[in-house]
Each structure stands twice: as C-alpha cells, then as structure tokens.
Image (cartoon, rainbow, N blue to C red):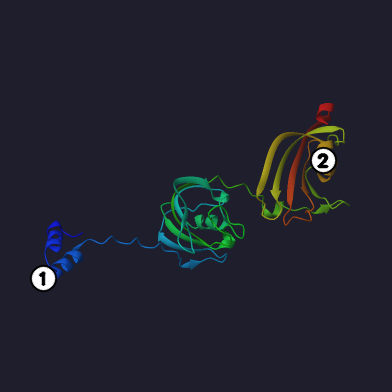
Amino acid sequence: MTSPTLQRALTTAALTPALLLQFAAAQAAAPVAAKPKPPVLSCTTTTAEGLSYTVIKPGNGDRPNAESKVVVNYKGMLTADGTQFDSGQASEFPVGGVIPGFAQGLQLMQAGGSYRLCIPSKLGYGEAGTGPIPANADLVFEVDLLSFTSPPPKPVIPVAERNCTQFTSSGLGFDILKAGTGKNPTDGDLVLVDFTVFDATSGVVQQKSEWEKIPLRQTSPFFSESLKMMQTGSTYRFCMPKAADSDSASNIIVTLIDLRPAASADN
C-alpha cells in the first residue's frame, strides 16, 4: 500500500526520477501474502494389495485389527487435484466399517502415529464413487491414530479337533466325542443342546450357545439329521458339506442335554 505522504506527492507533483524510485521502493517493501503450500498427495511404500503409505510420525505399541474400534483425526483429499472432501476430529468408528484401503492402513498404524494413505480407487469407492468423490477416484488420507480398543481374540479349535472321520450317505461328516445312553430325538421333539460353531479351516469359533432349545421341525435338513443320530448325554462333532456358493464351511460340536415332545407352539 502506498504511504499517504507518497500518495500526496504523486498527485501534486510531476513524476520525477526520484519520486519514481521512492515509489518503487515502497511497493517492494509492501508485504506479499504467502501462498498456501499444496498438499502432498504421494506416498513412499506400497503393499501387495496396492495401498501406498508414508509414515509421517511413528506410533508405539500394538496395532488395531479388523475387529478394533479406532479414534482418529483425519483429512481426505482427491489425488487428482487435492480437493478436500472430508475431515474429522476424534472420530470413532470400527476398522471393518470403512473402505478397504483405509481399513488396511489403520491396521499398519500404532497409537500416537500419523500416516499418509494413498488409496487407489479399487480399494476405495471404485466405479460407483459416492457424494463428492467421483467414479474411479484415487484418494489420499492423512490420519492420526489417537487410540483404539480391540475385543479379546476369538477362541480357536485345535487343528486335530476340526475335522470328521466318518460320513453318512448324505455327505454329513461326524465323530462321536462322547457316547450317550438316552433317547434319540425325532421330528416331533424339542431338544436342549449346547453347541459351538467354528470355521472348518481356521478353527475360529463363530458362535457358541448353551442350553439352546431347538424344535427339530425348524432346523435345516443336515442339522436335523445330525441331532437324530445322537442320544441324550452324547457329544458329537459334525462337519457340514460346503455350500456350492461358499468358499468356506462351518463345523459344529453339539452336546444333547435333553429332549421332550415339542408343544404345538414350539412347532
């Protein structure tokens, strides 16, 4: 900005060389607003899945897993032009509830750490896009992992106890872990059971229930066949055939505690 004195001189006198020099010096001394630095939209390390990341600040301790809930500060930008489309402070959400690239990146971090995540569209919103994010958009997130909590690990059935050695004509696998001495259930019975369902490959327990009342008429054909093989007091391991549209199978350990005729309401 031109000083008042110089402004008056310029409006009341001829532009002599001295005045021109004075004007030029005043203009050079005027403060110039600094341009904001453009965001950094690149990363240094790439994983096998295609996610890239840069460690801005390392953290300490354990890392989140897919079952964890995290608390983060974050900022999301479009790689194409740096446009910010989202941000959050002390935001809490489950790792499994975000796009795959973000979830993978969170599981690389430790509490107190700051990462830049470069997420290709295939690990983001893909061809569909969403809201301000166009189709096939690559994304960059800057993330501070403030804290996280993880549930206790699920129980795992030992390798030697996951599979079956005997099979029925229908393809149902089974092993008798404990023989019973009571009655066998029929279609008209309601059974009282303890059961544990687990992944046939990994052995991870998926569901566990005690004193569950089950009317046989309401079960699947394979589970009905399984229960009818048992006597009260027995424990069996059953291996259900894998469904045609599934890559995994679930096996089940069942203890038949008791049975009784099912009332009409149970059927």
Q: Is residue 25 visible?
A: yes
The answer for how far apart the CA atoms under marks 2 and 1 are is 107 Å
Does 30 sit left or right of 258 as displayed? left
Q: At x 68% / y 41%, what residue is drawn?
A: 208
Between 250 and 4, the one nearer to me in the picture: 4
Which is nearer the N-term, disc 2 or disc 1? 1
| Quadrant that contains the N terminus | bottom left
The image quadrant that residue 193 belongs to is top right
Query: What residue would you read off at disc 2?
Result: 227
Does 193 sit left or right of 134 as displayed? right
Residue 94 lies, in percent from the top left, at 54, 47
Residue 7 lies, in percent from the top left, at 15, 60
Type of amino acid under label 1? Ala
In contact (CB < 8 Å): disc 2 and disc 1:
no
Type of amino acid under label 2? Leu
Between 266 and 162, the one nearer to me in the picture: 266
- Tell me: residue 171, above or below residue 48: above
Q: Is residue 263 visible?
A: no
The image quadrant that residue 260 belongs to is top right
Query: What residue would you read off at disc 1?
Result: 18
- Tell me: residue 208, above or below residue 103: above
Q: At x 57% / y 50%, what residue is drawn?
A: 96
Nearest to viewer (mark 2 / mark 1): 1
Residue 119 lies, in percent from the top left, at 52, 61
